Amino acid sequence: MGIVGRKRYPGFDHATLPLTLFHILLGFVLQSLVLISTVTSTTASDLNYTKYNKQVSSLRLERIQRHLDKINKPPVLTIESPDGDIIDCVHKRKQPALDHPLLKNHKIQKMPTARPRDMEMEKKKREDESMMGGAWQMWHRNGTRCPKGTVPVRRNTMQDVLRAKSLFDFGKKHRRIPLYRQTDAPDVVSANGHEHAIAYTGTSQEVYGARATINVWDPSIEMVNEFSLSQIWILSGSFDGSDLNSIEAGWQVSPELYGDNRPRLFTYWTSDSYQATGCYNLLCAGFIQTNSRIAIGAAISPVSSYSGSQYDISILIWKDPKIGNWWMSFGEGTLVGYWPAELFTHLADHATMVEWGGEVVNTRADGQHTSTQMGSGHFAEDGFGKASYFRNLEVVDADNSLSSVKDILTLAENTNCYNIKSSYNNEWGSYFYYGGPGNNPNCP
C-alpha cells in the first residue's frame, strides 16, 4: 500500500487525452463518431473486468466524466490499496451525501445519542468465542489511514460506469417485483432474476434496528452482470407499491460494480421501491459517513475457506431514539455513519420487517440456471466450515434494546439451487446456514 498523488481525471488514459478531447469536440458536430473499446468476454471468469465490449459514443463518455467529477470529491489525501482500489480521503463536509437536496441544511451528527442496550454484554460474549475470526479491510493494512476530519471514499472510474447497463443504472438495484404472498412472508424478487435464501421477521411488530454476524466468503460469479451478496434488510412500506423503504448492509461480490470478484462491504437504501431513489455505497447522495477507517465498497479480508478458517463481520443498524437517523456499526461496535431520517417516508418512523440472508442474480444467459454461487457455494445442510452462516440474529425494540430473535421464518424460491436451514442455541442464538451452487443436476 502506498500514498499516491491526486488524479484530476480518474479513469482517463492521459497518453490518449488529446485524441479523446478531439473526439468529444467532433462529436458535437457529427454525433456519430464512436470510440471502439477492446472486446472481451462477458463471463466473470475473465480476469480483467475493467474492459467492456460496447461501442461508446464520445457524448456518452463526456456525460460519464461529468458524473464522475460530481461524485469523486477532491481528496485531502489519496491512498492506493494493495488490491488496486484508490481510496480518496475527502473532507467530511464535502462528502457525496451532502449533495442531496433534502440534506442541504443538514448538520452532521457526530455520534448517536444512544446505542442499543445490551451491546456491551454481547460484545464480551463475541470476544470470548474462539473458533471464528473477524474480517477487516485491505486498504489500510500498513497503518495508513485517512486524517482526522476526512472520510475514506472509494474512487469511481470510467470503466466502473461503462460496465453498468447505463449511467442511470450505475450503482442501482432493480425494483423488487412481487412474486407471491404467503402469511407474513416478504415479497421477493424473482421475475427479474433475483433469487434469495432468507430469514425474516413477521410484519406485526415495530422494529427499530437489527444486527447479525455474517460469515464472509468469495463466491464465484458466472456472468459479469450477476452478483452474490449476504446482507441485512431493514424494511417498511409495501412490496407491491412504489413506497417501499429499505436500508441494507452486508458484503457483496459484484464484478459489474467493482471490476473484480472480491467480497466488499456495501450499503444500500431506497425510499421508493428501488425506482429512482437510493444507490449502493456512496454512488449517490444519501448515506453520511463519519468514520475515517472504514471505506464503504472496499474489499474485506481475509475470507473463509472450505473446511478451513472461518471469518465473519458483525453489522448493526439502529434508529437513533432522539434524532431519528439510522446508524450503522461494523465489527465490534465501530461506527461507520448513518442514513438521515430526511431520506425516508415509512422508515422515518420505524421498520415493520427485517430480513437476513443471501441474494443472487440469475440471468439465465445460456438458457440454464446460473452457476453463480450464494454464500460459500454449498448447501445449508453441509454445516459449519462448509456452508455459509448468519449468527446471533437480533432486533432492536422501541426501548432501544437488543434481543435475540426467537421465531424467525425462512424462505428460498428454489431449494434445488439455494437453500436455508435455521436453528437456535445458547452460543449463537438464532442462526442459519444458507447458500448453494446454483446450476447443478437438480437445478438445470
Image (tube, helix red, strand yellow):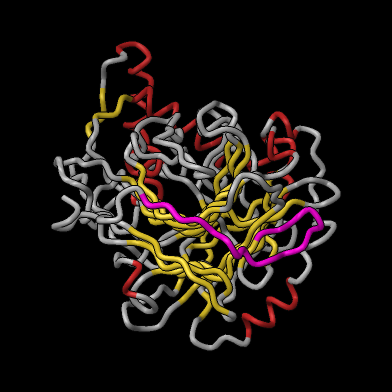
Q: Residue at x 51, y 69 (%)?
A: 431
- Give the residue drawn at x 72%, y 44%: 350
Q: Give the left or right position of residue 309, taking residue 2 as reference.
A: left
Among all residues in the image, which is located at the extreme front? 183
Count of all numbered marks drawn on residues in the image: 0
Q: Is residue 380 above or below residue 97?
A: below
Question: Which region shows up in magenta?
Answer: 395-412
Whether residue 185 is situated above or below residue 219 in the rendered picture: above
* 285 sits left or right of 162 in the view: right
**Residue 229 appears at what percent x and percent y?**
42, 55
Q: Nearer the viewer, residue 337 or 434?
A: 434
* In the image: residue 287, left or right of residue 299: right
Residue 25 seen in the current view: yes
When the figure is inspected, residue 38 is found, relative to residue 312, above or below; the finding is above
Q: Is residue 119 left or right of residue 136?
A: right
Decide which of 152, 217 is in the foreground and name it: 217
